[in-house]
Image: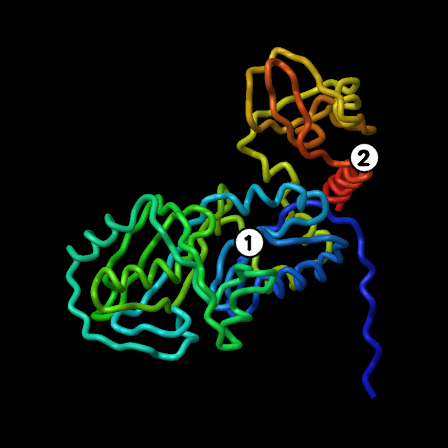
Amino acid sequence: MQAPRTRVQRRPVHGVLLLDKPIGLSSNQALQKAKWLLRAEKAGHTGTLDPLATGVLPLCFGAAAKFSQLQLDADKTYAAVAQLGVRTSTGDAEGAVIDERAVQVEAQDLVRVAAELTGTIQQIPPMHSALKKDGKALYDYARAGIAVERAARAVTVHRLDIRLSGPCTIELVARVSKGTYIRTLAEDIGQALGCGAHLRSLRRKATGAFDLAHCVTLEALEAMDEAQRLACLLPVESLVADHVRIDLDAQDAGRFLSGLRRRGPWADAAAAAVFAPAPAQPGRNQESGPGVFLGTAHIRSGELIAQRLLNPLEIEQTLQQKILERTS
């Protein structure tokens, strides 16, 4: 007879966890594991990594989910290994071999192809992807043996470095815009070289300003106690670090949170991060600390116009979470 499962008591958790996703787990499986370890009520990830891919996966908890689109839109940097001379049905090592060709590639060929595929290019999304068609993921159609017509999309390859690492193997590092499929890029490289290729491994090194140096693994997270896990969270405002910072006094902050526009000596800005003074705490300098994050706005003709705001409960919970982190 199996012992009854212990019910996890969920709690409000706010912030960003930079996870180094392991191989073999889907992004959602990794998210659910981290959510369970933190006992978080609400969480979401910022774009999927295939089960065979590893690397930077920002997970947004609580109020941070309101700003997750910023990471979905951010440029990504990947390191990958591709096998030349072999094409597969999925474009990666999981698929069946559909074509094999001889490989005759020199270093100068890689320089030429890298130049051809740098800049704005057209990509046809792969059938084995999470992109949806009529509300259904393309990989569901692919598993059913149904080929769906996909329109080519413009994506940007900001940087592409390719080098031979063996007679039939290349390593590549690419910084790309959102929506770029590295699996498809590897296939395009193989086609341009005249021998075909498929992706053998993929590791995301960075997304926006977040990189592997600041990531934590699920294994490390499991070994921590609850206070240590909370300490791994970056604050919600880390998602808007590149926004213009606006600090309001307490009175204007309250009005701003109610949706009222505020006027000030500010230059026009498309993206602003708005803060209020941190409430005084016994034994602490009220002027110290980064302030309380209220949300995002834009500035037009000296007016601060709210875009996406935390609600009062979320603000109170983030303050309490910071106090807990400091006292643990």
- Crowding at label 2, few (<14), some or many (≥20) Cα neighbours within 10 Å? few
- Whether the residues at callouts 1 and 2 have beta carbons within 8 Å, the answer is no
> In this rendering, would 201 be left or right of 41?
left
State the residue at coordinates (38%, 55%).
123
Numbered tag placed on residue 319 in the rendering = none
Q: Nearer the viewer, mark 1 or mark 2?
A: 1
- Would you place residue 44 above or below residue 195 in this image? above
Q: Residue furthest bottom?
A: 1
Q: Which residue is under mark 1?
A: 47
The x, y position of residue 278, in whole percent, is 75, 27
The x, y position of residue 201, in whole percent, is 40, 66
> In this rendering, would 267 be left or right of 193?
right
User: Is residue 285 among the parts visible in the rendering?
Assistant: no
171, 150: nearer the viewer: 150
| Count of labels in the image | 2
- Would you place residue 186 above or below residue 320 in this image? below
37, 187: nearer the viewer: 187
Q: Quadrant of residue 94?
A: bottom left
- Crowding at label 1, few (<14), some or many (≥20) Cα neighbours within 10 Å? some
Q: Which residue is under mark 2?
A: 312
21, 218: nearer the viewer: 21
The disc labelled 1 sits on which kind of residue? Gly
The disc labelled 2 sits on which kind of residue? Pro
The x, y position of residue 23, in whole percent, is 50, 68
The x, y position of residue 296, in whole percent, is 65, 31
SS for callout 1: loop
User: Is residue 180 among the parts visible in the rendering?
Assistant: yes
> In this rendering, would 103 be left or right of 66?
left
SS for callout 2: helix
